[in-house]
Image: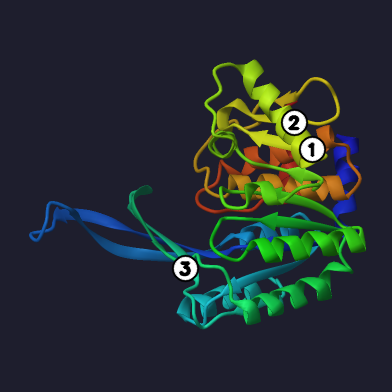
Amino acid sequence: MPKMQALCQAFKGLKVMVLGDIMLDSYQWGKVQRISPEAPVPVIEINREEYRLGGAANVALNIASLGAEVCCVGLTGKDSTAKIIHKLFNEKGLNTEGLVADAARKSTIKTRIGAVNQQIVRIDIEDTFYPNEKISARLIKSIKKELKNCDFLVIEDYNKGLLSPEIISATLKLCKEYRVGVSVDPKQKNFFAYEGVEIFKPNYKELILNLGLSFESESEFHSQAFGLRARMKIQYLVVTRGSKGMFIFGKAPEALHLPTAAREVYDVSGAGDTVISALSLAFAAGADIETAARLANTAAGVVVSKMGTATVNTQEILEYLKDGK
């Protein structure tokens, strides 16, 4: 515990940039009392609506909640959703200077509609095309302006269009120039574009999809993961596997396995955001990968016990660790 307390305290002196796909999570809850006469579907009378920051914005919010200074670079449209995103950034104390608006695209919003705390349907509105040359130049300018003053960069790639090959390449080049460490939470597109980063954190499904394999055994999983780490020149490959926990592949000949720290799972929305936030922050603060992963694992255990996209703070992490003794 003293080691974790000191680590959490060290977060306050760090500045981290989050680069990635900004989303808005909308929650609409109501009650179902009848079936529609137009089709065999329930009619939901909405009585509660809530907006939360999602995607890269939720990663930035988690980092701020953990005590570090954060700047966020991302892309929105020029629409009503963008206005809500800016409003939430301001309410949460997040700087909006890195948010680049593109009138040609829709801001990403995920609307979850449900009744009695049970999600019935999710509606996504988004554009996933890459930014044009003019918008890309503005994004790279924003990245360059802030990155030289940062201790670490977290890239949150949801494949919503921000992270084109050109922006990824330019960003990683700047990181080498400014000697800024990088962690990446990837998806399918550009999975192999993040060569040489410090931490690369796909989940198990993403690993399988991108390698084009279906692992027939744990030994094959480990062998292919070590192979990927070597090919991409990654310092640490961290693979999350839901209820099976987290697997870390580094220089050691054997993988490090951390079982899940979750005691009660209520909602897994945003759990991956919490893991990459806590993992990156702890690593940037000087923790070894095992300590950083244990802290991130604990943070995820806290956040999945909450409803909806949520954040975690250091006090909650330390109390969770204390209660687990």
Verify CB contact (< 8 Å) between mark 1 and mark 3: no
Q: Nearer the viewer, mark 2 or mark 3?
A: 3
Residue type for callout 1: Tyr
User: CA–CA distance between discs 2 and 1?
Assistant: 7 Å
Dot 2 crowding, Cα within 10 Å, few <14, some 14–19, many 20+: many
The front one of 274 and 230 is 230
Mark 2 touches mark 1? (CB < 8 Å): yes
Instruction: Work out which quarter of the rendered image holds the N terminus and state it.
Output: top right
* Quarter placement of the C terminus: top right
Describe residue 35's horizontal placement relative to residue 29 as left or right. left
Residue 258 relative to residue 25: left or right: right
Residue 21 image-quadrant placement:
bottom right
Number of other residues with Cα within 10 Å of mark 3, as a class: few under 14, some 14 to 19, many 20 or more: some
Question: Which residue is tagged 1?
Answer: 236
In the image, is 74 to the left or to the right of 82?
A: right
Scheme of image coloration = rainbow
Q: CA gap, disc 2 to disc 3?
A: 34 Å
> Who's the residue at 80% across and 53% down the image?
182
Residue annotated with mark 2: 248
Q: Position of residue 145 (x, y in %)?
A: 82, 76
Which callout, 2 or 1, points at the residue further toward the start of the chain? 1
Looking at numbered disc 3 in the image, what kind of residue is underneath it? Answer: Asp
| Classed neighbour count for the residue bearing mark 1: other residues with Cα under 10 Å, few (<14), some (14–19), many (≥20) | many
- Pointer 2 or 3: first along the chain: 3
Does dot 2 land on a helix, a strand or a loop?
strand
Of all residues, the one furthest to the left in this rendering is 37
Q: Quadrant of residue 168?
A: bottom right
Say whether residue 155 is visible.
yes
Relative to 16, say whether 1 is above or below: above
Q: Residue 205 placed where, x, y %?
A: 54, 36
Closer to the chain start, of discs 1 and 3, is 3
Q: Would you name the residue on which mark 3 appears?
A: 127
